[in-house]
Amino acid sequence: MDSPILRRRTLAGMLALVASPALSRSLPESRSLPDRPQTEKTTPLGYVRRMTVQVRINDHGPYAFLVDTGANASVISSELAALLGLPAGRPVNLHGIAGPEMVNTVTAASVAVGRRARKDLVLSVLPGRYIQAPGILGLDWLGAQGLVLDFSRDEMRLGSIAPRTDDQTVSVPVKATRSGLHLIEASVSGAATLAFLDTGSTTTVGNMALMQRAIHQKAVSTDWADIELQSLTGQSMTGRLAALKSVSLGKVNLRNLPVVFGPVHTFDYWGLSDRPAILIGIDVLNAFESVALDFTRGQVHFRLSSTAANGAAAMS
């Protein structure tokens, strides 16, 4: 299945969050909630939708949280944490694109979406101006629960997955690591590459090993552009934007895919720096009608939009 990807040069933001213990620092004193989360964010592809789920904290809310499959730590805005009076916990290092950043934590007695709730969940605290949402649910809350990104209906759903078997849907196997990350055995112009889907990242990013191999195999465009990446912790780094000629996820083939390459710390943390790897962000995922992450069966179901199916896309 081929899906053409348009290429644009703009600033990009991305984040994959992971947490480890750190030293103490005081909580912000803000008592007002941030603005409503933005539904679109700038990426090399232009604007993409950032969908949310309705979350109740200690029976208050609901609040529109993002869901991040590239983060092992859930996050709450400093404003919402202060408003709810959540008790402070042990500070941690939050690992973003440029390295670890020491942040505070709070503990919520209950974090619920629908009927599913987690008790005594530790939440990392970040300013609302960075995350542009009341909070983010990570793998510590999501666990093995299924996640559906339904771009046709502009909604995100958590729960069991009923896979579709029609001509527009392709299922790709994923393998869970001990850390909870789910990896896809992908390929870039025929060369083996590890891939993972990061619903918390607005930008698709490749590690340095992938960049070097792509250049060697002439699998990437020669037209490069420097671009600034800014994480939701406020960190920033400079990457290089180019287009990979072909990225295959099973039978899903993405052509002329804009990717930002750089020494991104996220790959180091997940142990994915020694071989070519790519983080597939929401900028690419929203090219599909829907993407269903079925962790129970170890599959991701990509459903191509009818517009793309009638155009340049075809099942391979």
Image: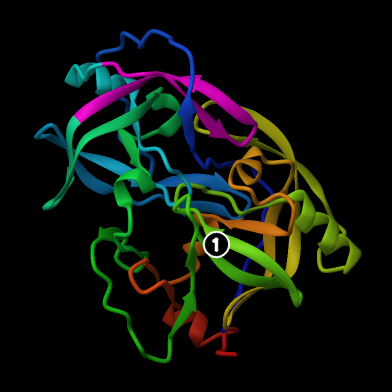
Vertical position of residue 300 compared to residue 37: above or below = below
Q: Which residues are magenta?
A: 88-108
Magenta-span inclusion, residue 94: yes
Magenta-span inclusion, residue 159: no
Task: Count residues near mark 1 (Cα–Cα under 10 Å), then give few for <14, some for 14-19, many for 20+.
Answer: many
- Secondary structure under the numbered disc 1 in the rendered image: helix
Q: In the drawing, does residue 115 fall left or right of residue 26?
A: left
Residue 18 percent across, percent down from the top left: 49, 37
Residue located at (58% from left, 50% from top): 203
Image quadrant occupied by the N terminus: bottom right
Amino acid on which the number 1 mark rests in the picture: Val
Quadrant of res 218: bottom right
Q: Which residue is mark 1?
A: 284
Image quadrant occupied by the C terminus: bottom right
Q: Main secondary structure of the magenta part?
A: strand
Vertical position of residue 220 compared to residue 20: above or below = below
Residue located at (75% from left, 77% from top): 190
Vertical position of residue 197 compared to residue 89: above or below = below
Residue 48 percent across, percent down from the top left: 48, 53
Q: In the drawing, does residue 170 fall left or right of residue 223?
A: left
